[in-house]
Structures are given as C-alpha cells and as structure tokens.
Image (cartoon, helix red, strand yellow):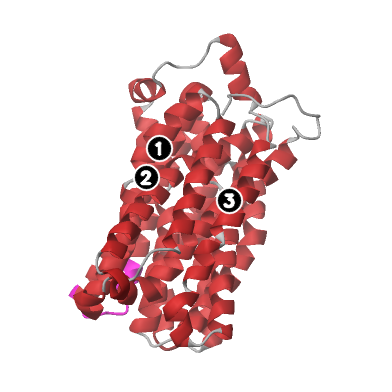
Amino acid sequence: MTTTAAPQSSAARSPWRIAWASMVGTSLEQFDFYLYAYFSAFFVGPLFFEPLGPAGSTLASFSTIAVSFVIRPVGALIFGHLGDRIGRRATLLWTVSLMGVATGLIGLLPTYAQAGWFGAIGLVLMRLIQGISLGGEWGGSVLLATEHSRPLKRAFYAAIPQLGSPIGSILSAAVFIVLSVTLPESAMSSWGWRLPFLLAIPLLLVSVYLRRRVEETPVFMRLAREGGRERIPLAEMFRSRPLALIIAIGAAQLGIGSYALMNTYTMNYGSAVLGYPYLQLLTAATIGALLQLVTIPLFGALAARIGSALVVGLGAAGTALIAFPMYLLLQSAGFGVLVAMMVIGGILPTMSWAALGGLMSDLFPARFRLSALSLSYAVAATVSGLVPLATAGLGAWTAQAWWHPGVVLVALSAGTLVAAIAAGRHAARSD
C-alpha cells in the first residue's frame, strides 16, 4: 500500500466528498463492531460460555467486549505510527481489512455445544483483532475528513465521520430485528445469529473500494514533501504535549462510554432485569440512533461556530442532569416512554460525541496528530469498554438498585466536563 494516491480531480478532493467517503467507511466498520455488541447482549453467554451458568456467562460475555477495548491502545500505537509515517489513507485500508476479516470469521466459529471451549478461544482472538483494527480507525477517519478542509470548517467536517457510529448501530440493530421477526427463536439461536457476521465479507469489499478512491490528505502530503514527519511520532507527542493527551482522553469518556452503557449494558439490563422484550429494546435504540443522523451534523455546525470544547462541555453537563431521572422512569415504562428515554439519553451525549473530533484535532499538531488522536481515543475506549462489566458488578452489589446505571453515566459526564473546560483553556493558550 502506497503513501499517496494517484492524482485525482478537484471534485474527488473536495472536503465534503471526502468527509462523506470517510463516514461511509467508518459506518461499515462500526456496523461490524456493533453487531457484536447486540450479539453479546443476547447470545454470547448461552452459546459460548454455557457451563458458567446464567450470571457467569453474562459476565464472560461482557468480558469479551472489554477485551476488544483493552487491546485498542496496541492498535493505536501501531496504526498511529504508520499513519504519521506512511499516510492516513494507507493506514485506513489496513484497519478496515482487519475488521472485516475478523467479523466474518466470528460467523464461522463453533459454539460450546459443537466444540467445547475452542469456539470461545476463537471468539476472544477475533475480538482482539477487531480491537486492534479500531485502535487506528477513528483517528484516521477524522483526519481524513479534517485535513482536507479549511480550519474554520474543521469542527464541522470532524463531526461527519461520527455519523458512522449511529449508522453502524442502526444497520446492525436492523439486521437483528429483521432476523428476529423472520426466524423462530430456535433457528436464531442455532444458525441465524451467524448471518449478520457473514455479511462483513461483502461489506469489506465495499469499504476497501471506497477507501482506495480517497486521496491522501494535503496536510500529510505537505509534511512528507517538506520533511516534516517525525521519526518516532509517539515519542515527540509525549515530549511536547503530555497534558493535551490527558485532556483528550478525558474528553472522550462520555462519547464512547455512553454507547457502551446504552447499547450493551442497558440492553441486557432492560431485558434480563426489567423484563422488556429485547425486540422492543432494539427498536427503541434504533429510533434513538436515527435521530443522531440529524443531530450530529447540527452539533458539528454548532461546534464550528462556538468551539468544539464548549459543545463537548454542554453535552456532558446536560447528560449529568438527566442521568438519574432517565433510569428512574425506565423502571416501569411502556414502549413509548422507553423510546423517549433512548432518545433523551442519546441527544445530550451526542453533543459531546459530535464535537469530539474537532476538540482533539485542535489539541495536536499535524506531525504526530494521528498517533495522538489514536492513542487518546483508544485509552478512553479501553476505560469505556469496562463500563458494561463495571455497571453489571455495581448492579449485583446494589441488588439492582434503579440508580446504579445513573451513577456510571454521571461519572462519565463529570470526567468529560472537566476535560472540556481544560481543552477550552488549552486551546486559548495555544491560539
């Protein structure tokens, strides 16, 4: 894979076109990743960890989610370095290829009933590969969009790849909803769960095609032409911007952690503890994600006007205010209230999510920007990957008290709010 693409037309290099191409590729990769989030909430435990019993298999299921987050910093180190040395475009071709192959292979794994613990070992291995892939995916997608744009528009274009997360969530939930409606439960548990993962193979071909048509960013091409690339980007980042790295990690906590809390833990909690049919939960989550298709670009435009750090902070403060009321109402709600909770619980964290790429891009110079974005995001994702497991443990310790998920959501919000305030001050000093 080469560091630069062949010369293309000015239309092919337009920031708008490249931002949307970046978003499509990220959407397909997030589709692969979210497939497993829904899969883990309902099928991983019984199919792969059956001997551990209901409670043990649930914890093991959430642990396989945590594994892919814990390994992300390794992927960030690898692909961050490559992205700052050989280019953003070439690196993204590798990340999407790893994700597609690993996801497709999950659909071929044998269950515990078929091959004992062999399937569980393979599952953990594929999750490790998925996590390594995502370690370099997010930062590369954001920079592919922002480094083709003018500085004043950077916050808006940084929000466009963020659409990949709700689109991936919508597509993966829609697949499971369709399968749940068309297949009996016995068929779904027997072989139907494999079909969404096998879809990753044709989607991989689409992703590679789209990313091969995207040109390398002008920012990286200028660095390469002028000899401005760092020999060891990560070392220079730690030397010159250690505080910015800490700020970026904190700012990402709510945007990533709220997805882990809502799309994984709350799905399982609502089904197993509160008694909601899981099809209702999937439908409510999908409706909430559809709304994000509108709110993310709007919040990105707002960030371009008033600053990314301020938008991230407003989202964090608002989420902290609604966390406990939301989970209180969720205890005895009909389907309409359930949808409303998913919508309300999604809008405010979405503010922090939409402006996150712009905030991080403002913190770091181009010569080690991909290493910085990838590592900070990966470390934040590692912490957030423990959210379902930690929340489940807190629920068990409090006898499933209604407020226990709210405690976690408020903690995530508080960390992001403090980081957003620090980011605003850091950016002002830099300016």
| Residue behind mark 3 | 204
Q: Is residue 112 above or below residue 79?
A: below
Name the amino acid type tagged 1.
Ala
Was residue 401 drawn as part of the magenta stretch in this picture?
yes
Q: Secondary structure at mark 3?
A: helix
* 320 relative position to 173: left or right: left
- N-term-proximal mark, 3 vs 1: 1
Q: Which residue is situated farthest in the front direction here?
A: 115
Q: Position of residue 216 (x, y in %)?
A: 64, 28
Q: Which residue is mark 1?
A: 76
Q: Quadrant of the N terminus?
A: top right
Question: Which numbered disc flags the more N-terminal residue, 2 or 3?
Answer: 2
Disc 2 is placed on an element classified as helix
Q: CA distance from mark 2 to mark 3?
A: 20 Å
Query: What's the amino acid at mark 2?
Result: Arg
Left or right: 430 with respect to 23? left
Q: Are marks 2 and 1 in contact (CB under 8 Å)?
A: yes
Residue 248 visible at all: no
Mark whose residue sits in front, 3 or 1:
3
